[in-house]
Image (spheres, grey):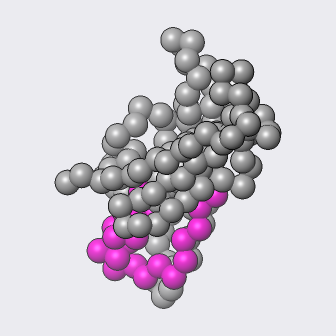
């Protein structure tokens, strides 16, 4: 199964591409037709050449890991007989220089706060659900970045 994302960028009149003075703003168009504004991170490319109000690639990677874990967790919880009424994750990624000298997102911490209706999972059940979700998350299985779950118990 193929998944498609189109990245669309164009230079603007008056910019000096050769000098690095060009906007990194672009559009990320997903195969369902939804468009998200994208840009380089302002921590990587300073304004005015980046757009703080747009999603940067690092944020999209972190969001993809978080979203995948959530979707897998919700399915695991449902199959285990739990009813989830809310799931909110404030995931955080860290960029560092690797041993090879490259800058990379080297760690992502998922911090889901989950509200259950009716029966509450024990700490052991919650840990098992997160572990199973992490093991089956397609995105986590696709990256070498350390992904940890720091869910409150």
The C terminus lies in quadrant: bottom right
Q: Residue furthest front?
A: 13
Question: Where residue 8 appears, x then y in whole percent?
Answer: 49, 48
Q: What residue is rendered at 29% in x and 74% in y?
A: 79
Q: Residue furthest left?
A: 1
Q: Is residue 145 left or right of residue 153?
A: left
Q: Residue furthest bottom?
A: 118
Q: Is residue 52 left or right of residue 127?
A: right
Whether residue 36 appears in this view of the structure is: yes
Please determine whether, in this image, residue 148 is positioned above or below residue 131.
above
Whether residue 109 appears in this view of the structure is: no
Q: What residue is rendered at 72% in x and 34% in y?
A: 15
Q: Is residue 75 left or right of residue 47?
A: left
Q: Which residues are magenta?
A: 68-91
Indicate whether residue 82 is drawn in magenta: yes
Question: Where residue 57 appears, x then y in whole percent?
Answer: 55, 42
Q: What residue is rendered at 48% in x and 88% in y?
A: 118
The N terminus lies in quadrant: bottom left
Q: What residue is rendered at 64% in x and 46% in y?
A: 25
């Amino acid at each position: 199964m193929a998944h498609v994302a189109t990245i669309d960028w164009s230079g603007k009149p008056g910019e000096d591409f050769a000098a690095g003075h060009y906007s990194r703003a672009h559009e990320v168009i997903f195969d369902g037709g939804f468009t998200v504004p994208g840009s380089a991170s302002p921590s990587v490319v300073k304004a005015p050449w980046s757009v703080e109000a747009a999603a940067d690639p690092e944020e999209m990677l972190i969001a993809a890991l978080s979203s995948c874990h959530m979707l897998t967790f919700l399915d695991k919880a449902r199959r285990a007989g739990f009813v989830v009424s809310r799931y909110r994750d404030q995931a955080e990624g860290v960029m560092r220089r690797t041993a090879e000298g490259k800058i990379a997102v080297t760690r992502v911490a998922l911090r889901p706060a989950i509200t259950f209706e009716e029966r509450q999972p024990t700490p052991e059940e919650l840990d098992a659900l997160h572990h199973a979700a992490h093991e089956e998350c397609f995105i986590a299985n696709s990256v070498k970045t350390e992904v940890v779950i720091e869910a409150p118990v």
